[in-house]
Amino acid sequence: MAEVHAAEPAEPAEPEAATIDVEGGQTAAEAHYDGPTIPTEVWLLVALVVLIAAAWRPAKRAILGGLDARAEKIKADLDEVKRLREEAQATLATFQRKQRDAMSEAQEIIAHAERDAERLRTKAMEEIEESIKRREALAADRIAQAEAAALAEVRNTAVDVAIAASRQLIASELDRDKARMLIDSAIEELPQKLH
């Protein structure tokens, strides 16, 4: 393999002290200065730093303004959430109070209904007892009436039987004249017995 050697730059020759006037009042020696040069990357880096420095202040204002606006929006959102949470807690407390009130009212209604039911049951029992007593009294009256009617019927039947027996007995034992005389005397005594 052949080695390739890079050609070494020739050492700069010493500039001649020339007094040739180049444009702008410089000497030829000054115009051809070959001192250490700054690489292009450094110039680009410097330009980038200058550009960033120049853009930083407006960008910083825009970024900080955006962040401040975002912080204000977040704060407003947090305040809204806090307000909504307080409203929700107040609404929850109101509903819980209403629920407690409804429960106590329901318990009062149940207790009132139980008292009314007990009162109605007691009243119904009293009415049933009174009705039973009335029916017993009515039945006793009917029984007494039936007994009285039966006794009257038995008496009437006994009287009818006695009268029939008396007739037969009288008819068989009495003659007609004596029977007429007894009938006449009974008729005469009848107005005295009716008074």
Image (cartoon, rainbow, N blue to C red):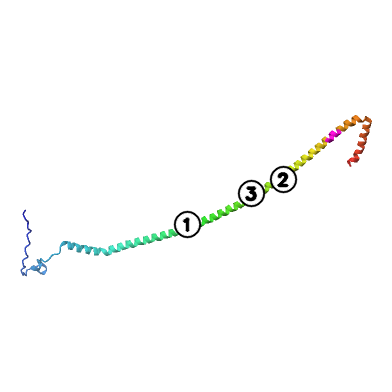
What residue sits right under mark 2 in the picture?
A: 134
Disc nearer the start of the sequence (2/3): 3
Amino acid under disc 2: Arg
**On the image, which quarter does residue 103 sit in?**
bottom right
Q: Position of residue 43 (x, y in %)?
A: 17, 63
Q: Which mark is residue 92?
A: 1
Observer-nearest residue: 97 or 87? 97
Instruction: Verify whether residue 49 appears in magenta.
Output: no
Looking at the rendering, in which quadrant would you find the C terminus?
top right
Residue depicted at x 43% and y 58%: 85
Element type where label 1 sits in the image = helix
For marks 2 and 3, give the CA distance. 19 Å
Label 2 near label 1: C-beta < 8 Å? no
Element type where label 2 sits in the image = helix
**On the image, which quarter does residue 146 sit in?**
top right
The correct choice, above or below, for 29 with respect to 113 in the image is below
Q: Position of residue 47 (x, y in %)?
A: 20, 63
What residue sits right under mark 3 in the picture?
A: 121
Observer-nearest residue: 12 or 141? 141
Q: Which residues are magenta?
A: 158-163
